[in-house]
Image (cartoon, rainbow, N blue to C red):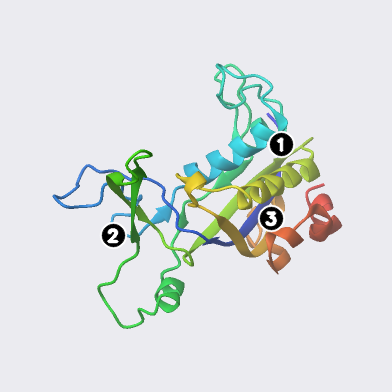
Amino acid sequence: MKRFLGKMFLRGELEVLTGIHIGGSRDNMEIGGMDNPVVKTLNGVPYIPASSLKGKVRCLLERKYGVVEARSEGQPCGCGKCLHCQLFGSHSADSKTLTRCYIRDAFLNEEHYRQHFRFPFEEDFAYTEEKAENIIDRLKGVAQHPRFMERVPAGARFFLEVVVNFYEEDDIAALVGRLLEGLRLLEDDYLGGSGSRGYGKVAFRDLAVSVKNKQDYQEKNQEHPIVQGENLAALTIQTLGAELLSFFR
């Protein structure tokens, strides 16, 4: 088994630039309720599941670089050796590998939401918006088949945390560079559903990077900050500096 070297922590916020829809359960739908609800916590607050974020980043990277080996066409890579399998895990039981990248569920920054949408003193307010959609009959020029989509509105922010584990013989620069590339691809694509209709444009804000090595877990368990308060465009292997590349050696 490969020897553990340490962890990198990437934290910040994911800002919604256009209304976002990540579908939730309709098991408890009421009469007259929303046709297409968003996923929410037990308290009714929308959040972004880690699986949605991780899956979209991996998909965008594999669309760019291709899939080395898959169980069937359109499936994630299962070779167990490429950077994508190392980061996100092998999609095959026959070629297992250590998964380096952990992405947490992204929960809503409720304080920012209240301030941004001016609900500082209201107990009962909406976390989402309702958007009506329909299909236009090309011959008659009239709307048909109306449906109502629930969305988290533009301006909402979610707390982001990504953890990357490093092991001996890992190409740290390549792994981190590929992860940052995937996040950049996502900023120019969309998260959730209905991206072709304008949904799901996001941006990463106020990013901070810190690290821990294996000795830190034996001592004070203290993180070592490398970068504070950067946007994604400014965050590169070069800006992270030699400290990141040498910290785990």
Mark 2 vs mark 3, foreground winner is 2
Residue 104 visible somewhere in the drawing: yes
Residues under labels 2 and 1: Cα distance? 41 Å
Picture quarter containing residue 165?
Answer: top right
Residues under labels 2 and 3: Cα distance? 34 Å
Picture quarter containing residue 172?
Answer: top right
Q: Which amino acid does label 1 sit on?
A: Arg
Mark 1 Cα within 10 Å, few/some/many (few <14, many 20+)?
Answer: few
SS under mark 1: loop
SS under mark 2: loop
SS under mark 3: strand
Query: In this figure, which residue is indicated by the disc labeled 2?
Result: 43
Query: In this figure, which residue is indicated by the disc labeled 3?
Result: 212
- Quarter of the image where the N terminus is located: top right
Residue at position x 43%, y 71% in the image: 113
Query: In this figure, which residue is indicated by the disc labeled 1?
Result: 3
Task: Kindly indicate whether the residue at mark 1 contacts the one at mark 2 (C-beta within 8 angstroms).
Answer: no
Mark toward the start of the polypeptide (3 vs 1):
1
